[in-house]
Image: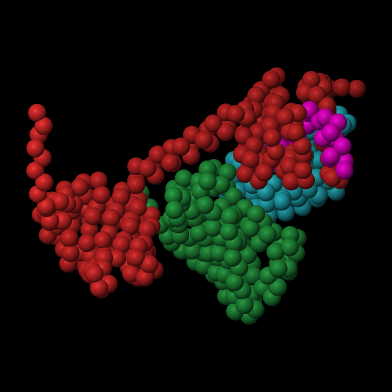
Chain colours: A cyan, B green, C red
Amino acid sequence: MATENISVIKLRDLLLVTVPPDPDDDTISALQEQVLQAMTRQEVRGLVLDISTVQTLDSFFARVVSETVQMVALMGGRTVLAGMRANVAVTATQLGLTVGNAITALDVDRAFDLLNAAPAGEPQP
Amino acid sequence: MNKSHQGELLITSENDIVVARKIVRDAATSLGFSLTDVTRIVTAASELTRNIYHYARSGVVRWRFLNQDSTVGLELVFEDSGPGISDVEQAMQPGYTTGKGLGMGLPGSKRLMDEMKIESVVGKGTTVTVRKWRG
Amino acid sequence: MKKNMSTTTKSPATVLGSEDSFRLLVESVKDYAIVMLDPGGHVVSWNAGAERFKGYRAEEILGNHFSCFYPAEAIKRGLPELELKTAEKEGRFEDEGWRVRKDGKQFWANVIISALRDKDGTLRGYSKVTRDLTERRQAEERIRQQSKEIMELSTPVMQVWRGVVVAPLIGSLDSQRTQQFMERLLNRIVETNSPVALVDIMGVPTIDTQTAQHLIETISAVRLLGAQVVLTGVQPAIAQTLVHLGVDLAGITTRASLAAGLQVALDILHLQVVSKNGTH
């Protein structure tokens, strides 16, 4: 069965993965594989997952993302989930989904800013 | 409207989950549901179709336009001849799973939709019916 | 001069108008479809309104069973027969639903079926009065749409600074309001690309567990987007209630006033700018 192409781009020591609008289960699993492969090949300290065109975020997708975040963390990297759509965020919240320890960002630009910033940048409540 | 008011899709491969999403998205959109409601319906359909594939390997998804009083709605039926659910109440507990660690399909879908009905017989199969009405 | 009013005893038929003129009355009414059915449900009389709503001329439709005006689904469920039975038992049946015209188009109708009995109580047939409510339904639809828009206008989410939106909350949050509030807030955050949202609850007089849970849900959704919420306008009474309710607001920044919240927002944004340019 045809797997849609997930775009994986390496920018210095960061990975940018662009997820297509409605990926099938195989494509989502392939995402995890490709990220892991990229990380074994060279030093990657951060992963940006661009989900700005994704229309459906169900529990399977959320689980794969969550696992990927954990794997990246174990290998010393951080993951940023960028550009979630408003309707997707509302639905995901209602569904009770979490995305593990992924950081979230409004868009890919801000995602890169976050990863390039000094580690402790958030104010305390 | 020229679109048909009902239809069905046979589920035989993992790829049919995404086909189901597309068909349900079309149906919900043509009924005039808001974008967020369309997202809710499609997400619930994704969960429930995946349940069919993972527990029974095959089944059918049926959809139907509803008309009641002065509102319209969409009904989706997910039917399989899989192992069935022995304890429906337990299956509705979030996080409970006997499968591949998903455990969100049923309780999650219930939250996203307006009505849900589960009929299941162990060893024979399961039928999940959900409905959403347009605000 | 007084006019001499002749008083002739008139028979009831002439007082009400002759049968002929009564039939003329019914037949020419255009705003209501007035149809008579025999006890079996077949059309035995047809008026101008019926022709107007349903598209059939009298000679085309007389003798047909009235179920032909119902959509296929309704016929499958036995709705026409059920309606006649109800009218027979209770004297009357009223319903609103879809009916089908001769050209296949559907219209939304209000239908009243009454059982017609003669002096000894024998069922002679049924009268069926139908009103086309399609326009009314469309008007209701428009009103519903407008109320939604009014609701949106009454709780706007405003951008007060580059990167900061303010959403004042007034009253309590039930499920439906939460959904609308969440959608509005999240859409504005995305539209304006604002990493900080100040949700001001000064206008929330009392807070119960449900509202608190819905607030937390909203805050979670905002986080998924990549933004964060600063809860402002938290008054002493609300603070006390939240603590007593055991609501866990860990990780959520809160302030008593909107102004203090805005300061926090600016600090967050400033920090983002500073760290972007490199800081030690």
Residue at image position (54%, 42%) is: B35
In the image, residue C269 above or below residue C116:
above
Residue in front for this viewpoint, A77 or A119: A119
Where residue C116 sits in the image (x, y, percent)?
26, 65
- Image-based side of C171 in relation to C241, left or right: left
Residue in front for this viewpoint, C61 or C86: C86
Image: magenta residue range: C221-244
User: Can residue C227 be found in the magenta stretch?
Assistant: yes
- Report if residue A27 is visible in the image: no
Residue at image position (37%, 42%) is: C136
Where residue C155 sits in the image (x, y, percent)?
63, 30
In the image, residue C52 above or below residue B81:
above
Residue at image position (53%, 64%) is: B77
Residue at image position (52%, 46%) is: B135
- Image-based side of C195 in relation to B66, left or right: right
Residue in front for this viewpoint, B68 or B65: B68
User: Can residue B61 be found in the magenta stretch?
Assistant: no
Where residue C153 sits in the image (x, y, percent)?
57, 28
Query: Residue A80: which quarter of the image?
Result: top right
- Report if residue B87 is visible in the image: yes
Report how many numbered discs are placed on residues in the image.
0
Quarter of the image with the C terminus of chain C in it = top right
Where residue C196 sits in the image (x, y, percent)?
74, 28
In the image, residue B8 above or below residue C215:
below
Residue in front for this viewpoint, C92 or C99: C92
In the image, residue B7 above or below residue C192:
below
Quarter of the image with the N terminus of chain C in it = top left
